[in-house]
Amino acid sequence: MASRDDIIKFCDELLDSAAFSDYGPNGMQVPGRAEVTRVATCVSAHRESIDAAVGAGAEMLLAHHGLFWDFHPRSLSEQMAERLRSALTADLTVAGYHLPLDGHPEIGNNALLRAELGLQPADVTLGEVKGRAIGAVGTAAGGIPAAELFQRVESATGRPPLVFDSGPAQVERVGIVSGAASSTLAEAIALGLDAFITGEPSEHVMADAREGGIHFIAAGHYATETFGIRRLGELLAERFGVEQEFLDIPNPV
């Protein structure tokens, strides 16, 4: 058993969440029980994940995408009220870590995906969002065939990516910004990268990739953002002795 507040403090400090501007609040969003024996983690906090956490016997749900966003209305919709009702009735703590969990240099989505792809860290910044660079750049010494990179992405994410195969046959430098970061493609081209990986495509990226001579790889918003939150749950189990479970609720986007 561990203290809810100790767990949240650890996450806040590890991820340096107070230093980030974001599209919604980071940290604890719904306070639940003061003591925690089991933590559930997920990509997105919504009704299905909340109900799954309660069903799994968790007292805390940690999500990459929390409940509250700037684009939501300030008054509660019926759907948001149901989410909150489910959490409050079960006395479930809900916390979210968005940009801090994308950009962390060790357990961030982008750093972990880079490692999964067998790429070495490069001292290059990529993907500035609200004043902080959250992306990762990786290198492959001597280069790897582009087709091999595409296969590595599929193996790491568990789904075939959408690929605009417009870069060199041998890939040496790869940029990664998980989620919805198609707009970062121009930055990747300016840096002279051979490939750029994100989650979601935008209509303009096919032509931009062709004209920029770069491979564009859309591997899924959900699929590229399972890494950090899963690792955070594992760290909590190691540090606090709590049980932990990743709730895999796939989203095709």
Image (spheres, grey):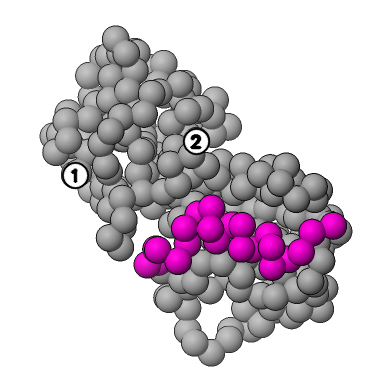
Q: Could you tell me which residue is drawn at 53 percent across and 74 percent down?
A: 68
Is 64 placed above or below 238 here? below
From what the image shows, is residue 11 above or below residue 89? above
State whether residue 222 appears in this view: yes
Mark nearest the camera among 1 and 2 is 2
Image quadrant where one finds the N terminus: bottom right
Examine the rendering and report whether any part of residue 47 can be seen: no
Residue displayed at 79% across by 71% down? 34
The residue that label 1 is drawn on is 186
Image coordinates of residue 78 in percent, x first then y, are 64, 83
> Is 71 on the left-hand or right-hand side of 35?
left
Residue at image x 53%, y 58%? 13
Is 6 covered by the magenta stretch? yes
Res 71 quadrant in image: bottom left
Q: Quadrant of residue 49?
A: bottom right
Sequence-first tag of 1 and 2: 2
- Identify whether 226 is placed above or below 84: above
Q: How many discs mark residues in the rendered view?
A: 2
| Residue at 75% from the left image edge and 50% from the top image edge | 240
Q: Residue 37: horizontal and vertical position, in percent?
A: 84, 57
Residue 114, image x, y percentages: 43, 31
Relative to 187, 64 lies left or right? right
Would you say residue 149 sits in the magenta stretch? no
- Pinpoint residue 81: horizontal percent, then vertical percent: 66, 82
Helix, strand or loop status at disc 1? helix
Which quadrant of the view contains residue 166? top left
Which residue occupies the foreground of this view, 209 or 40?
Answer: 40
Nearer to us in this view, 221 or 92: 92
Per the image, the residue denoted by label 2 is: 112
For badge 2, the amino acid type reads Leu
**Segment tinted magenta in the rendering:** 1-22
